[in-house]
Each structure stands twice: as structure tokens, then as C-alpha cells.
Amino acid sequence: MRKDAIAVGTCVLLLAGGALAAEPSPTQANLQTAYQRDLDAHARYQAFAVAADREGYAGAAALFRAAARSEQIRAEQHAAALRHLGGSVTTAASAVGTVRDTPFNLRAMLSHESAERFGSYPRAVRQARREGLAEAALGFTLAHAVEREMVVLYQEAVGRLDALRAPGEPFHVCRTCGHVARGARPPETCPVSLSPSEAFERVP
């Protein structure tokens, strides 16, 4: 009886130890959060693009589609980084949120991206550095740089709503980091990831 009790106790301790070992690190948790947040933004911006097309804001619809593709790329990068650290990626149903008229949607997008730029990513970078995870810190740093450039595009869009009824210049998105560039041709080098122009894809 005593031997059985000891064996059961040992199994419990081993299971508890395994559970503790499976607990994600703060950076793994940050990667999971960033992954799901970007998936949500991807779905939301796609919905914004549909609304903009319906309302006759062709230029805004193109920006929303480029932003959605950027979010998708960054979500994929966060998921890859999490797997690289031995974590498992959990995907929940995307939360689109409220979709209203295009002027409101642009302001909502600007508010969301500004919050990530000034809050989420800087904290994640600092945490990854504290854990000595240089690759994760670099990934968050690149995502932060992409957000910074995106905020500029959103600010310009909010300030010239009437002009966004015209198609405007096309957008190109870097498949390495998600950087969005506006113009007939992509830049020769991505200013964020330093990838060549071949890494860019044109967003219709």
C-alpha cells in the first residue's frame, strides 16, 4: 500500500513538473498575442475594404487591402517565431469588430495601429531582450518599424478623404516584413527588412 502511494505521488510530481515546463514564457505569450491580434486586424481591414469599395472610396479600399496583407504577413512571422521557440500556435476565430463608414473605419485603424506602435511592440521588444531572445526581439522591432510607416499612411489618408475616391497609386507589400510602399513600382530595397524589390507583391 505504501509503495502504491509513493508511486502515485511520484506520478503527480512528474505531471506537475511537465505542466510547469509547458508554461509559455512571457515572450512566447507576447508572440501568441501578436499573432492573434494581427489575424483579427487582417479580417477587420478586409471588411473595411469591402465597405470602402461599396461607398466609392477606391483609394481607401486599396489601402485597407494593403494593410490587411501586411497584417497577415506579420501574423505568419509571429507564428513562425513562436514555433521556433518551441511554442504551439493557437488560432481563434478572427474578431472583426465594428465596421461602419469609411471615414470612421480609417480613424479606427489609425487608433489601433498607433496603440500598437506606442505600446504593444516596444514592451514586447524589451521583454524579449530581457529573456535574451535576440531573434524574437528583432522580429518585434521590424513589426514596430512597419507599424510606424503604416501610421504615416493612415494619417495622410484621414487628412485627404475626398481624394481617396480615386484609385490613386498602387500599393506594394514586402513579403518579408509586411512593409507597405505606395507607388507604381516597389522600392529597390525594403527600408525595414532590407529585402530586394523582388520581395514585394502588388496589392490589387
Image (spheres, rainbow, N blue to C red):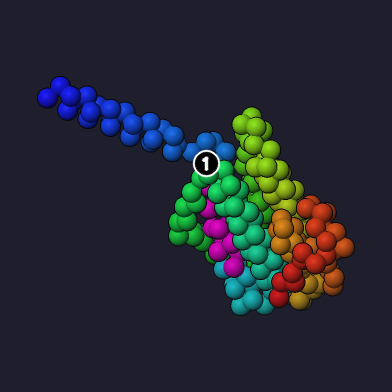
Mark 1 lies on residue: 29
Q: Residue at x 51, y 45 (%)?
A: 87
Q: Residue at x 75, y 71 (%)?
A: 202
**Residue 42 part of the magenta segment:** yes
Q: Main secondary structure of the magenta part?
A: helix
Residue at 61 percent of width and 31 percent of height: 131
Q: Quadrant of the N terminus?
A: top left
Q: Position of residue 66 (x, y in %)?
A: 69, 66
Which quadrant holds the C terminus? bottom right
**Residue kind at label 1, given as amino acid type:** Ala
Q: Which residues are magenta?
A: 29-46
Given residues 87 and 119, the one toward you in this image is 87
Within 10 Å of disc 1 (Cα), the crowding (few <14, some 14-19, many 20+) is some
Residue 201's place in the image compared with 108, above or below, is below
State whether residue 105 appears in this view.
no
- The residue sitting at the right extreme is 188
Q: Position of residue 203 (x, y in %)?
A: 71, 71
Residue 161 placement (x, y as % from top left): 74, 66
Between 104 and 195, the one nearer to me in the picture? 195
Q: Is residue 157 magenta?
A: no
Residue at position x 74%, y 61% in the image: 174
Q: Is residue 26 above or below residue 90?
A: above
Left or right: where 188 falls relative to 29: right
Residue 59: give x, y in percent of width and height: 73, 72
Asked if residue 80 can be seen in this view, the reply is yes
